[in-house]
Amino acid sequence: MAEEILVEIEAPAPPPPIPGTEADKPDAAVEDLRQQLEAITAREAEQKTAREQAERRARESEAEAVRLRESETKARGETVDSQLDAVANAESAAKAESDTAENEYAAAMEAGDYKKAGAAQRRMSNAEARLIALGQSKADLEAAKRAPPRVEPKPQQVDPLEKFI
């Protein structure tokens, strides 16, 4: 029997690319994919930066809104206090006017001068009517001072994707 001899031939290695030829350049598809990846990465970085800036501006706006609400509440309190002081001063003036008119009325009645008594009576009535109105104003202001400040609801932010769904 004859012996079989098995010979294996290896494929020759491809020759190294010659500089300056097409074989030396990377595949055009790979280069295109690399450029697309770089563009996507750059775009994502820009979007991330823009999102971070928008979130920072939103936080700053919210902080400014809180500061303004606190300032408004303080100013409203100061305004109510000054209005209460003005009402108290007006009440004192109306009370003094009523007392003066009452004294003039009594003096006119003692003297029998009914015309002066009538004028004093009108001044006294007007002063008492102002006292009643000022008392109501004072009660309204004190109620406003005790009432919690109105908080306007802030608009809800809706995710566009959630809105779409």
Image (cartoon, rainbow, N blue to C red):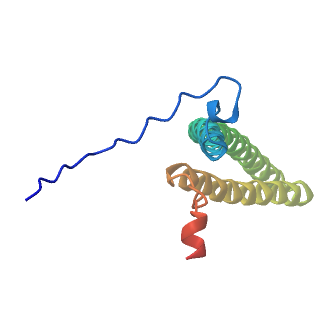
27 in relation to 117, above or below? above
In the picture, measured across the screen, residue 99 lies left or right of residue 45, that is right
State the residue at coordinates (88%, 56%).
Answer: 119
Query: How many numbered circles are shown?
Result: 0
- The residue furthest bottom is 165
Q: Position of residue 30 (x, y in %)?
A: 60, 43
Q: Is residue 118 left or right of residue 75?
A: right
Q: Quadrant of the C terminus?
A: bottom right
Provide residue 3's location: percent of width, then percent of height: 11, 53
Identify whether 111 is placed above or below 62. below
- Residue 54 visible to an observer of this rendering: no
The residue furthest top is: 19
Q: Position of residue 81 (x, y in %)?
A: 61, 38
Among the 4 quarters of the image, the one containing residue 74: top right
Which residue is nearer to you in this view: 63 or 120?
63
User: Vertically, is 71 above or below 130?
Assistant: above
Is residue 160 among the parts visible in the rendering?
yes
Which residue occupies 80% across, 58% down?
126
Asked where in the image residue 56 lies, by quadrant, the reply is top right
Task: Give the residue displayed 62% in from the left and 41% down from the top.
Answer: 27
> Which residue is the extreme one toward the right?
115
Place of residue 131 in the rendered image (x, y in percent of width and height, measured from the top left): 69, 54
Which is more toward the observer, 125 or 93? 93
Q: Give the residue at x 78% y 49%.
A: 101
Nearest the eye: 34 or 124 = 34
58 vs 18, nearest the viewer: 18
Taking 66 as reference, is 20 left or right? right
Which residue is most to the front?
1
